[in-house]
Every structure is written in structure tokens, then in C-alpha cells.
Amino acid sequence: MSLIHALVAQGSTILAEHQGGVRDFSQATQTILSKIPPNNSKLTYVWEQYLFHYISEGGYVYLVMADDSAGRRMPFTFLSELQQKFVNSAQASSSTAEQPAYSLQGTFGPVIAQLMNTYNTSPPTDEITRAQSELAQVKDIMVQNVEQILSRGERIELLVDKTDNMASQATAFRRGARTVRRSMWWKNIRILMLSVFVGLARIYSDP
């Protein structure tokens, strides 16, 4: 599955989304949404082996999470078509006021799901070809921005999950270290006692 999670948000408020996988990436998407600037932009964020591509325009954010093997062309083609469907829908044109979270889940969520299924099974080649020229215009900016993020060590990390994992690993390491130290201590004691015994035996055995 190339496309894993897609959503439409107004600012950082998710209006509708669809998640194809089993793992919950809601914390990751919320973290990324909070980092997206309010101005119009196209960018890719990197986290672990996943890429979070987004288009921000007119106060709305169109975001898709994909495997790194999917590249950038196909996910951004998907986002362009998702944006077009949303802009042409009655939900987007009815009001520009701030909308409640998941207020469009029932109406636009199935649209996201259907579009994700289409691109995961048989992505339209015509749409990808058309979007290739558009993507080329922002390719340099995207690569530059991603490289800047990586060089500053600003990979997006889910600190809660990683902290829990690191804490568990640290606890296991400390327990293992104590066991090794205890084992080595007893081993040294046994060697020392054996050396003393051998030394005493030699003393008593000498005439």
C-alpha cells in the first residue's frame, strides 16, 4: 500500500480523513499539521520510513502519508486531484468560516477513501503525466526544504512513543547490566577463593 493516510484540514483542524492501514498515525498527522505555515506551500516531511506530502492553499491543507517507495510524483498527483474534488464540492464552497473538527467526515471521508483506493490499485497515468510538469516547478524548493530539515536534525518524531520505547529499552538494559555485574562479581570471588585455596594447599603440602 503506497498511500496510507490522507486528510483535508482547515488549518490544523481535520475536516475529513481516511486511514488505510491498521497503525494509528493520528498523533503524527496532528504534529505535522501544527508545523505547516499558513501561507500557500507544497512540501514533504520525513518521519521514519514515511513521507508526509501536503499542499496548503486558501486556508485548507491536503495531506497524504505514503511509503518512501511511492516517490513524490504520485502522491502529489493524488493531492492535486483531492484538492480539485474538494474545491468543487459543496462543502468547500458553502462557507469559508471555521468549521468543526471532522464536520465533513461523513460526506467527504468516502471521497478520500475511494480516491486512495484508486491510486493504490491503478493510478491514472494521464493525471500523473499532467501533474509532472507542475511538480517540477516546486521540485527544487521541496528537495531543498527537506534537506534543510534533515541537516538541522528536525525529523518529525513521535516523542511519546519513542520515549516509552526508549524507557523500556533503558530499563531492560539496566536490568541486564546488573545481572552481568552480579555474575562477574561472583565469578571473581570464586576465582579469588580458588586461588587462595590452591595457595594454602601448596603451603601445607611443602615439607
Image (cartoon, rainbow, N blue to C red):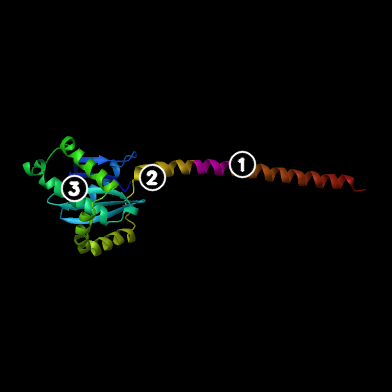
Q: Specify the principal SS of the magenta part.
A: helix
Q: Amino acid at mark 3?
A: Leu
Q: CB under 8 Å between callouts 2 and 3?
A: no
The residue pinned by badge 2 equals 162
Which residue is pictured at 18% across the width and 50% down the height?
Answer: 81
- Dot 2 falls on a residue whose secondary structure is helix
Give the quarter of the image for residue 13: top left
Q: CA distance from mark 1 to mark 3?
A: 61 Å
Q: Residue furthest top?
A: 106
Q: CA distance from mark 1 to mark 2?
A: 30 Å
The residue pinned by badge 1 equals 182
Query: Going from the N terminus, do you reach mark 1 or mark 2 first?
Result: 2
Instruction: For label 3, count other residues whose C-alpha is less than 10 Å away and answer few (under 14), some (14-19) or many (20+).
Output: many
**Residue 163 in the image: x percent, y percent?**
39, 44
**Residue 148 in the image: x percent, y percent?**
29, 61
Instruction: For label 1, count other residues whose C-alpha is less than 10 Å away and answer few (under 14), some (14-19) or many (20+).
Output: few
Residue 90 placement, left or right of 117: left
| Magenta range | 172-179
Does the magenta-highlighted stretch encompass residue 137?
Answer: no
Residue 182 placement, left or right of 162: right
Does the magenta-highlighted stretch encompass residue 175?
Answer: yes
Query: Going from the N terminus, do you reach mark 1 or mark 3 first?
Result: 3
Task: Indicate which disc residue 82 carries.
Answer: 3
Query: Going from the N terminus, do you reach mark 2 or mark 3 first?
Result: 3
